Amino acid sequence: MEHLLATASKSGLDLEDLRFAQIMDRADPLARLRNEFAIPTVNQATGRDAADGNGLCVYLCGNSLGLMPKQSRRILNEEMDEWATKGVMGHFHHSKGRPWVGYRSQIVEKMAPIVGAEPVEVGVMNTLTTNLHLLLAAFYRPTDQRYKILIESKAFPSDHYAVESQIKWHGRPADALLLAEPRPGEHTLRTEDILSLIRQEGASIAVVMLSGVQYYTGQVFEMDRITAAAKAAGCVVGWDVTHAAGNVPLSLHDWGVDFACWCSYKYLNSGPGGISCFFVHERYAHDADLQRLTGWWGHDAESRFDMTNQFVPGVGAAGFEVSNTPILVAATLLGSLDVFSKTSMEELCKKSVLLTAYLEYLLQTRIGNRVEIITPGEHRGAQLSLLFASEIFEHVFGMLMSAGVICDERKPNCIRLAPVPLYNTFSDVWWAVDVIHAALYTSRD
């Protein structure tokens, strides 16, 4: 916020002035990355054919589905051409130097720094919930003493259903599902309450599995502190970093996390239903005795084609992969990772902090007490979750969407706005708040 105030003072403009946002955009060192993405027009995004709808929409929904990187279309088309002209030979002799048999290595090399991992710790396969089940199959080994799994009470349904069904699959009692609840009247979980719950229940907890960023509130959990406390209590620690990967700084290796997984179509922009990735700490890289559900693709790459039917796990996360990398969906992720390689998470997060602080400031000054921001001021990424009174909620959301401000709603009264630093601008933020202001302070007649 200090940088925003200093820039405003130097320019002689108020932060609420659109010209201030435009100054910030011109000075943005990452502004060039916006051109890497296909941004829909208002008409395209809303399905209308209005005369004034040919301008670009304000896309603040990257926490649900990221925009399409132009590189993804190029790489996908190249793989289609390769298939057309090479057929099966594309597995080993690829005209662009991307042989399909080793496609995963290109993705894990570029994904690893985004999540704070070593390449050997990153795998790519399947979709999120499938990977949750595969990882829990390996790491949830309940005993009579340790059989509980700690999750948030408001976890995304993918996580809740996966954990609940794993508990049932293992024949464990209902109290094996241990839920961390916010305090009465609060929307977010306090770290001290999570740590207290781990201290109280630690001897009975087999796995602690929380989300890196809470999808509804946008709260970033203190993953380092929680991981350390859980490991000290003898628990296995897993994280669903779906809303964190590509959004906030992660250090999965250094924190000592046992496993993690994430989808790639939100902040990582791999496209609808895009392929998932996962993390298994390097301490397990050569642990062939670690029980897991196996498949041919997890067999050691050097002897995979010997077809002996005697499973020898690959080193690290590769030994957990079960199936051939789906090239056409992996290609779109590779296109996005090429964009990420043009910057760093440090630079992206620096801009993200400014964008989100600017959004918060404008909401507070222009909208005031007619909106409640439930996302924490300190522990957050590129998202603010806004609560509106029930009688105006639908009107505000409808106005935003009609104006080409693409965001999402969570019933009964929450609107989530996600200014993504790869492609959003300070002007985007200004326009979004301006539409909310117009919705609240102009007649609905």
Image (cartoon, rainbow, N blue to C red):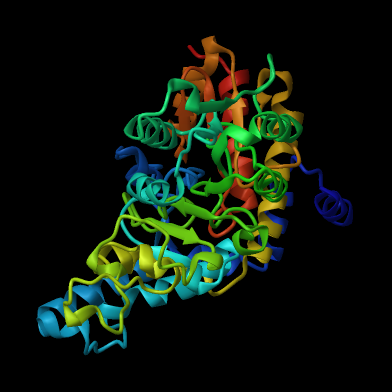
Say which of 183 and 94 sits in front: 183
Say which of 251 and 390 sits in front: 251
Residue 3 in percent (x, y) is at 83, 54
Say which of 170 and 384 sits in front: 170
Give the residue drawn at x 83%, y 51%: 8
Give the residue drawn at x 45%, y 52%: 262
Residue 340 in percent (x, y) is at 52, 68
Give the residue drawn at x 75%, y 40%: 16
In the rendered image of this protein, does residue 352 appear above or below residue 51?
A: below
Quadrant location of residue 202? top right
Residue lying at the far front in this picture: please name it. 144
Horizontal side, residue 280 vs residue 223: left or right: left
Residue 336 in percent (x, y) is at 43, 66
Give the residue drawn at x 51%, y 43%: 60
Horizontal side, residue 170 vs residue 259: left or right: left
Horizontal side, residue 224 vs residue 116: left or right: right
Give the mark count: 0
Say which of 419 and 151 sits in front: 151
